Image (cartoon, rainbow, N blue to C red):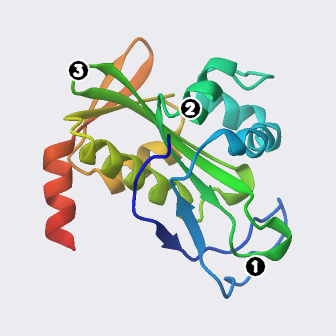
Amino acid sequence: MVNALQVSELVVPGPVSPGQATAAPPAKPCVVSCEVGPADRQALLELFVRSSPDTRRSRFHSALSVFPQRYLDEILTGRQLALVARDTCQEENQGKVFGLASAAPITPGTAEFAVWVDDAWQGHGVGTLLVRGILRLLADHGTRTAIGIMEPDNLAIRRLVGRVAPGAVVRFEDGMIVVSVALPDWAGAQGARS
């Protein structure tokens, strides 16, 4: 099953290795695509391999050494809503997945969402685009509340969610930060901005 969502575009500089100067923006946009399916297995496994232990811990709340098979299967078969960011900017990275957003139902009307961006692409707007995309997809599917669970020291994702969903309710629970986004209100605010 392929998730239906309008393609979004974002022009971002290419990935930057530590100590390297920021590259000039590419001539072509990078595209966020919702086309996640069995053919994406290898690209998602490669995203996992490229991710630092800190990025894996932030995404999975544990320093994993292997991509969780059940999670991968649920994304690839459509049991979880998922979007990927693909590189369409650079010929040598054409089609490479450099970000993933996913969401799984936890109760009727509520889903937990998460975002994961390749280390080299963090700080370029990819996470913002993916969070907006997954929240829009959830709202389109009739989900009323989106929940994000994050580590307290993950300041980047806390700021990102604050920008994308400024009306989100934040609470501390079991040593984690839980963000709740009322999707009808969020979607209404997004519609008013367009």
Q: Residues within 10 Å of mark 3 (few under 14, many from 20)?
A: few
Front tag of 3 and 2: 2
Q: Secondary structure at mark 3?
A: loop
Q: Residues within 10 Å of mark 2 (few under 14, many from 20)?
A: some
Amino acid type of the residue tagged 1 in the rendering:
Ala
Q: Nearer the viewer, residue 161 or 108?
A: 108
User: Residue 15 is drawn in which quadrant?
Assistant: bottom right
The residue carrying mark 2 is 77
What residue is disc 3 on? 108
User: Distance between the Cα atoms at labels 2 and 1?
Assistant: 36 Å
Q: Amino acid at mark 2?
A: Thr
Element under label 1? loop
Which image quarter is the C terminus in?
bottom left
Query: Disc 3 vs disc 1: which is toward the camera?
Result: 3
Give the vertical position of 27 relative to 164 (above or below).
below
Kindly report the distance in space between the C-alpha atoms of the residues bearing marks 3 and 1.
45 Å
* Residue 77 x/y as whole percent: 56, 32
Q: Nearer the viewer, mark 2 or mark 1?
A: 2
The answer to whether residue 141 is above or below residue 191 is above
Please state the horizontal and vertical placement of residue 122, each as a whole percent of the image.
63, 56
Q: Residue at x 40, y 47 (%)?
A: 134
Q: Secondary structure at mark 2?
A: helix
Which residue is label 1 attached to? Answer: 23
